Amino acid sequence: MTKSIFVKSVCLAGTVVATASWFLLSATASIAQSAGNSKDLRLYVMDCGVLLYRSLAKFGYKPGEVKPTDLSNGCYLIVHPTKGTLLWDAGAIPDNLWGNADIPPKKYYAEGIVPLNKQLAQIGYKPDDITYVTASHAHWDHVANLYQFAHDTWLVSNYTRDKLLSQDPPDKTDPSMFAALKDTKTINLPDDKDYDVFGDGTVTIIPTPGHTPDSRVLLIKLRKSGPVVLSGDLYHFARDLITNNVQNDQNGPQSLGSHAKVQALLKEIHGKLWINHDYNQFNSLKKAPLYYD
């Protein structure tokens, strides 16, 4: 390799790393304000368990390329000042597994941190108070508490609803988990178009197929913190932004197309990307009852 080619290669690599870093949030928690006095959109981050899963092979990495960690698992509440609330993702551990002793329950390779109900109560909400509920996709670690929101409005694609209410639901779930949702009021999410949750452009559900056919990300336009995109499972690690790695059990071409779509969006809006399962980034975020606005 000639010196000029080597320099160009190093510069290009540095640009890619810098661009990836620019996409990610540098989480600096500000002093909490009084939520009751806020007239802005608010975003609450809740810790919905940890996935004790450190194998990298599933994510396309070789040993040494990424430092193994557990995987975080968040639930997110968005509070609109006048138009209601949206719960995005419902965790891996259903609240009904928690006993009176508050011993963190386990399910498969997930372990509970705090019951979702308890975290909502800290903000002043019960499941029946929530206006809309949805999940980034239908995998078991994102839908465990959907049953609690049967009296709310479920934002869901036909694909996801039919799958969850069938006698052959997604892996690691069973029909009883979703029986309460059979008669829940629903709003259909289109497969090929964005969905404006509150009708004012502040919160938008964006299709990003690949991880699953029904995968989506959520764009939240916060006045002070700026635009934030919640990744769902489009990405799992910060390094994915550099490598464009995708899981070996998902639709690779679709995932790469969704990567390009979201990265273009982030660049256009100067947005931040919060990677749901990135343990280090998730732990840097402030948690409810603190919030971003």
Image: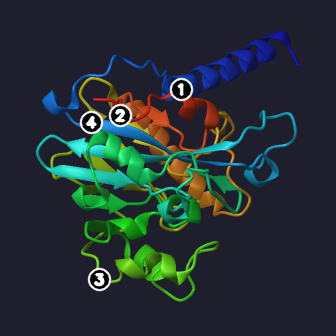
Q: What's the image's color scheme? A: rainbow
- Asked whether residue 99 is in view, the answer is yes
**Residue at the spot of label 1:** 284
Q: Are marks 1 and 4 in contact (CB under 8 Å)?
A: no
Q: Tell me the CA gap for discs 3 and 4.
A: 30 Å
Task: Identify which amino acid the numbered label 3 is placed on.
Answer: Asp
Task: Identify which amino acid the numbered label 1 is placed on.
Answer: Ser
Pointer 4 or 2: first along the chain: 4
Q: Are marks 2 and 1 in contact (CB under 8 Å)?
A: no
Residue at point 29%, 55% (across, down): 126
Q: Quadrant of residue 287?
A: top left
Q: Quadrant of the C terminus?
A: top left
Left or right of 266, for residue 201: left
Tag in front: 2 or 1: 2
Q: Which mark is residue 183?
A: 3
Q: Secondary structure under badge 1?
A: helix
Residue at point 80%, 16% (across, down): 6
Q: Secondary structure under badge 2?
A: loop
Q: Secondary structure under badge 3?
A: loop
Q: Tell me the CA gap for discs 1 and 3.
A: 39 Å
